[in-house]
Image (cartoon, rainbow, N blue to C red):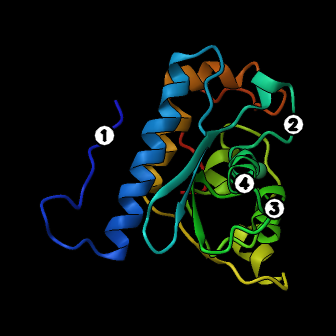
Amino acid sequence: MLDCAMTSQGGKRASAEELDEARMREIVKFTARTFLTPYPAPFGALIVDTKTGRRLIRATNAVMRENDPSSHAELRAVRLASKKLRRTSLAGFTMYSTCEPCPMCMSNALWARLDRVVYGATIADANCHCLQIHIPAKEVAGRSDMKCEVEGPVLRELCDSLFRHPKMQKAFRTWSSGKPRRRPGSRKQGK
Ligand SMILES: [Zn+2]
């Protein structure tokens, strides 16, 4: 099972790296909850205040649930956050995603003016299980007029375990973007 124990507790001031990992663990745990629903998804996104770390919103991928190919976790998180704040700029906020944002979601993060995007598993990791568009999030950000720090992978193995969960492996077979099942024991690429 997933080990989602929080770190950085006990009164000591946590390093930036520890904070990133704690938040990634939080969104992994939240995302894993979808495995108990009819629509399991390995993609989850969390938006927090960059300075205070206060959580603004969490979202998971709802493509299957909403029959909407654009309902990626990061895109939904930005939509929900903007509606909650009643403004289009998320400057001052950071997004954590269990997987490197696709070009659609990274572009949306840039339009939303997010300060930072921190991701777990990579596009290559996700591509072992479902179809992907092979443009790194850092490249999308680097070719934009908007400034957004992109960091990752963070807790890559933990985030990748969402994709490898038996519930998820079964669900991928029903996804239009799913890939044929690999032979048992075959090694995945891209690690
Ligand atoms: Zn996406």
Question: 51 or 190, which is in the foreground?
Answer: 51
- Which kind of residue does numbered mark 1 sit on? Asp
Q: Which mark is residue 24?
A: none
- The answer to whether residue 129 shows anywhere in this view is yes
Residue at image coords 43%, 69%:
52
Q: Report the side of 68 relative to 175 (left or right).
A: right
CA gap, disc 4 and disc 3? 8 Å
Q: Earlier in the sequence, mark 4 or mark 3?
A: 4
- Which kind of residue does numbered mark 3 sit on? Asn
Q: Name the secondary structure under disc 1.
A: loop
State which mark lies toward you, 4 or 3. 4
Q: Are marks 4 and 3 in contact (CB under 8 Å)?
A: yes
Q: x%, y% of residue 4?
A: 33, 42
CA gap, disc 3 and disc 2? 15 Å
Most distant residue in the top direction: 38
Q: Earlier in the sequence, mark 4 or mark 1?
A: 1
State which mark lies toward you, 4 or 1. 4
Which residue is under mark 2? 69
Q: x%, y% of residue 164?
A: 52, 33
Which residue is under mark 4? 78
Q: Are marks 3 and 2 in contact (CB under 8 Å)?
A: no
Which residue is under mark 3? 108
Residue at image coords 64%, 58%:
100
